[in-house]
Amino acid sequence: MQSEILFREALVSDIPQIQVVRHAVKENTLSDPSLVPDSDVEDYIINRGKGWVSEVNGSITGFAIASIRDNNIWALFLLPEYENKGIGKQLHNLMMDWYFSQTHETVWLSTGIATRAEKFYKLQGWEEAGPYGNKETKFIMTCEKWKSLRESL
């Protein structure tokens, strides 16, 4: 029997499971797990913006976090066994719809070069905006482009 995937806003109580997901990824890994402490995750989902989680049988399988304060996508990660099931796209769309319901400011993100994540963002309509640091690419999305993409669905 296939389990139902639930999508909801992230809560502070979800942070331990969010960290499990973040540290389980195979690409865009953290060189040091302490680089993203629980306090940062809490700040982003409470003060800077909002987050969403995907959940199966009470366990978080993925999460996405957008920052209104920084006009950026702070995170979108899935447990490896839940990739390629449409979950990332659903989290992405929830986050982006919310972001552009709050502001019309262009949003940006960065991700590793030549990764599955880079391909994912290109498929979602993000525009490449050049290098970000030494090993990442920066992407942008305007409100107009997002609305156009959503209307074409």
Image (cartoon, rainbow, N blue to C red):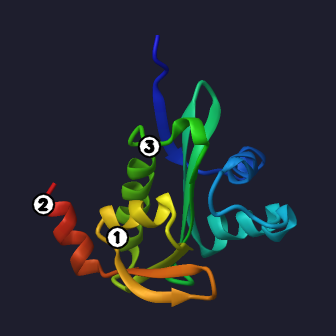
Q: Is 100 positioned to the left or the right of 47 in the image?
A: left
Above-or-below relation of 70 to 48: below
Asked which secondary structure carries label 1, the reply is helix
Q: Which residue is mark 3?
A: 87
Q: Position of residue 53 (x, y in %)?
A: 56, 47
Looking at the image, is mark 1 or mark 3 nearer the viewer? Answer: 3
Query: For residue 36, which quarter of the picture?
Result: bottom right
User: How would you rate the neighbour count of disc 1 (Cα within 10 Å): few for under 14, some for 14-19, many for 20 or more?
Assistant: few
User: How would you rate the neighbour count of disc 2 (Cα within 10 Å): few for under 14, some for 14-19, many for 20 or more?
Assistant: few
Asked which secondary structure carries label 2, the reply is loop
In the rendered image, which quarter contains the C terminus?
bottom left
Q: Position of residue 148 (x, y in %)?
A: 17, 70
Residue at (63, 29) in percent of width and height? 58
Q: Which residue is mark 2?
A: 152
Q: Is 71 positioned to the left or the right of 44 in the image?
A: left
Question: Tag 2 or tag 3, which sits nearer the N-term?
Answer: 3
Query: For residue 86, which quarter of the picture?
Result: top left
Q: Which residue is mark 1?
A: 101
Q: Residue furthest top?
A: 1
Looking at the image, is mark 1 or mark 2 nearer the viewer? Answer: 2
Q: Position of residue 131 (x, y in %)?
A: 51, 88
